[in-house]
Image (spheres, rainbow, N blue to C red):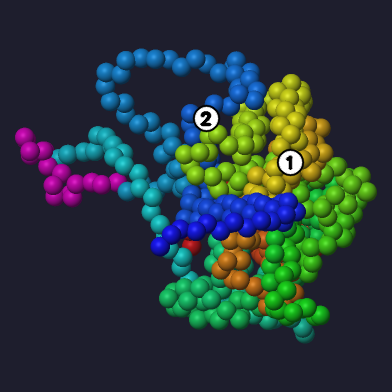
Amino acid sequence: MRNESLTVTISKTEYDALKAKIDELEALNDWYAEQLRLAKHRQFGASSEKELLPDQLVFECFNEAEVFQNAALKEPDFEEVTFKRRKTAGKRDELYKNLPTEQVVHELPENEQICPECGGGLHACGHSVLRREVTIIPAQVKAVEHVQTVYSCRNCEKNAESVPMIKADVPAPVIKNSGVASPSLVAYILSNKYGLALPLYRQEQEFKRMGLDISRQTMANWVIYAALTHFKIITDIFKAEIIKNDILHADESTVQVLRENGRKAQQKSYEWMYHTGRDSQKPIALFEYKPTRKAQNALDFLNGFSGYLHCDGYAGYKKLEDQGVTVVECWAHARRKFADALKTVPKKDRGNTKSAIGLKYCDALFALERKYDDEGLTYAERFKRRQLESKPVADEFFVWAESMIKVPPKTPLGIAVNYAVNQKRWLMNFLLDGRLELSNNRAERSIRPFTVGRKNWLFSTSTDGADASSIVYSIVETAYANGLVPYLYLKFLLEKLPNVSPDKYTELLPWMPKVKASCSARVAESG
């Protein structure tokens, strides 16, 4: 059998079309391979982006020695170690510093306090603390009866026709017409749900184990009542205070609300979050539920605000520039896109990729910020150092990124490069003021408890529930921002708000000295 070759003649136009199709399919195949590697990393890889680059990677795009040098850093002392060092107790002392201490003194039984030499009586002549342990006191449930005392006058009882009857004051209940809810109980439920992401149905089960039968429906009613009746008073004050700042952070995340007029249950709604900057003397984290992601939501909330707004690349925030707001975009978002691009590259090849170069530029900027923090620079000093050190790095990064703009835009590297170049104007705004931050992580950290909790409770049933959640998250995250224990602050508010006049509301704000003294970061009183 003889071999026969088949020759097909095609025109140049057909050849070019076939070649273009092959190039397109090869590019598509590469894209699918990259997406597969990225998906595998997201599912099985480490979530941290710190270890993406090999230690030996040499970055020659700028002088690292000048960027990372720190003249204030002392040279390390070298010594020959001739014995095993004992660990210092510093961290352990830090653990115990906020804990009340109870001593358990161990003594000999009285009948054993006899001298083995002469038979005389022994007396205690010293004590040694052998160890300190942390003891847990589990939550306890007890019934508290509020008994009102009635007073009358004995003289009037004997001599007058009428006897005055005077009753002792009794605090108003935290939930109207509830014979069960107390400030501590409602605060405990709210702290678990919004601080620890513990859904009501799990709390219902835990209460049953403690001998207390409270349905999740009852708890849900308490949550909404406490939020809309009591805590909204405080969050309204927060809203008036937050726009007085000239630096804010903003972020938003999705939430599902099942029963909302004119909307399907499957439609996504949004939780918006606004946070004060790091220089604020009155730290506030404020959440607001809105059914859409329209820019008008931010415009309405920030009406009257003018200053700097840290945010991500969402175009809606840029509409705030019409009312005098300077948008400062987040370098962590730009960095994350280069990190994602690098994850699509096999580990052995990462050191030689363009993605690694982009990531290294971003890391250099963050390294400079850490150095400024370590040196304890004032905001004015930070501003000057950024002009000398950070600005040249950022400028060189954008020169490099703009030279890479021809990278196919739908590849991970192309997405990272195009994002950076398109957002250049707003990414560079961190250089305008030493108080500004390189990232929007302050807002992302505060909204994370919401996103974590959402994985447990999945959705809100109604808009009242969504509004209540926004209000309580605002109280909890603002408590954290002011160094308060959320449970203690929630309990404090539930004790005070039903019983104080409106002119006293400002005394209940989390930055007030008396509030800090009673709700600061220490162990809650037992019992």
Magenta residues (range): 105-120
Give the residue displayed 58% in from the left and 37% down from the top. Answer: 353
The residue drawn where x is 70% and y is 60% is 253
Q: For the image shown, how many numbered marks are present on the structure?
A: 2
Judging by the rendered image, the residue that carries numbered circle 1 is 406
The correct choice, above or below, for 230 with respect to 386 in the image is below
- Residue lying at 78% horizontally and 43% vertically, measured from the top left: 423
Q: Can residue 187 be seen from the camera position used here?
A: no
The amino acid marked with disc number 2 is Leu
Q: Amino acid at mark 1?
A: Lys
Query: Where residue 217 sits: x, y (%)?
Result: 61, 81
Q: Nearer the viewer, residue 114 or 248?
A: 248
Q: Residue at x 81, y 32 (%)?
A: 432
Disc 1 to disc 2, C-alpha distance = 25 Å
Q: Secondary structure at mark 2?
A: loop
The picture places residue 130, in percent across and down from the top left corner, at 29, 40
201 drawn magenta = no
Query: Residue 372: x, y in percent?
Result: 65, 27
The secondary structure type at the circle numbered 1 is loop
Residue for badge 2 = 57
Q: Is residue 52 visible?
A: yes
Question: Could you tell whether 451 is left or right of 248 in the image?
Answer: left
The secondary structure that dominates the magenta segment is loop
Q: Is residue 211 above or below residue 96?
A: below
Marks 1 and 2, the one that precedes in the sequence: 2
Expressed as whole percent of the image width and height from the top left, the position of residue 112 reads: 13, 47
In depth, the one of 387 and 415 nearer the eye is: 415
Q: Quadrant of residue 6?
A: bottom right
Left or right of residue 6: residue 295: right
Q: Nearer the viewer, residue 383 or 169?
A: 383
- Decide if residue 122 is on the left or right side of residue 19: left
